[in-house]
Amino acid sequence: MKAWSLLLVLLVALPLVVGVVNLPTHDAPDAPIHTGVGVRYLERGVEETGNKNLVTAVLLNYRGFDTFFEVIVIFTALAAVLALPRGSAARPGGFPEEAAHEADGAGGRPAEAAREANGAGVPVSPVVSYVVRLMAPFMAMFALAMLFRGHVTPGGGFQAAAVFAAIFIALGLVLGPARVAELVPDDWRPWLQGAAPLAFALIAAIGWRLTGAFLGFPTDDHTAQEAMGLFLEVGIALGGGVILARLFLEMET
């Protein structure tokens, strides 16, 4: 059995090694990266997409289908986690109503609420708690700046989603997951978790209506292009942030 496993590894490794050895050097002028579709992105990307940030242009315009399936992947990951069977023990965190009531009963004290909600006996450092709560609004402002300036500067929906999720996670560590879960109303959670796929589905339908192509962007109307791109970025930021935060809170349970 070991011999067959070794043979299988060698059969898979051999073409990979040959492919790596035959890769062009980084400074080769005829390398595919210098002669392929990347040249068109650099020369005509702003004109064709209306996005001054070429990374955003590639992700939302040229490779829109790829990004569409990326948000579906993270949404499916959350659905798979939520579908896992639960144990019989009481859930200490996540988005359960009972945990939220337990945290409320702690008298609103962040450190004790975190201990009770997390089921841990180690108190949260008051310095860490103060710094996290103090910095959270500024982190949110930074995430919004990356979201709404991502079309002209480094940033965008995925980056903003990561920062939003980091805010939830940091607050969850110092205040307890149950108290942080209260920041997202119950009725909004399903829609926010599916915000990214829903945004892509809506823009895909609008693109079909305007251009006759699924997820198509009108090349002769840069205002419409920017509006559609911004809508997608907001959907990615909201959906991605809530999904990442929810995954963390579910792992805490």
Image (cartoon, grey):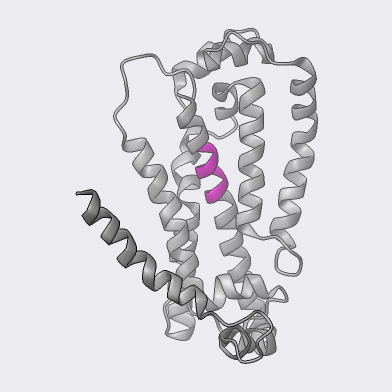
Count all numbered tags in the image, as a single digit. Answer: 0
Residue sitting at x 77%, y 15%: 126
Answer with left or right where residue 86 lies relative to residue 154.
left
Location of residue 78 (image quadrant): top left
184 above or below 61?
above
Q: Position of residue 206 (x, y in %)?
A: 47, 74
Q: Position of residue 33 (x, y in %)?
A: 60, 83
In this orientation, does residue 108 appear? no
Closest to the observer, 41 or 91: 41
Closest to the observer, 109 or 5: 5
The secondary structure that dominates the magenta segment is helix
Q: Position of residue 195 (x, y in %)?
A: 49, 52
217 above or below 202?
below
In this orientation, does residue 234 appear? yes
Residue sitting at x 56%, y 35%: 184
Residue sitting at x 26%, y 54%: 5
Question: Magenta span has 156?
Answer: no
Q: Which residues are magenta?
A: 239-246
58 above or below 116?
below
Question: Magenta span has 245?
Answer: yes
Residue sitting at x 21%, y 56%: 4
Check the image and name the residue furthest to the left.
1
Q: Quadrant of the C terminus?
A: top left
151 above or below 36?
above
Answer with left or right where residue 212 lies relative to residue 125.
left
Q: Position of residue 125 (x, y in %)?
A: 74, 16
Location of residue 232 (image quadrant): bottom right
Closest to the observer, 217 or 175: 175
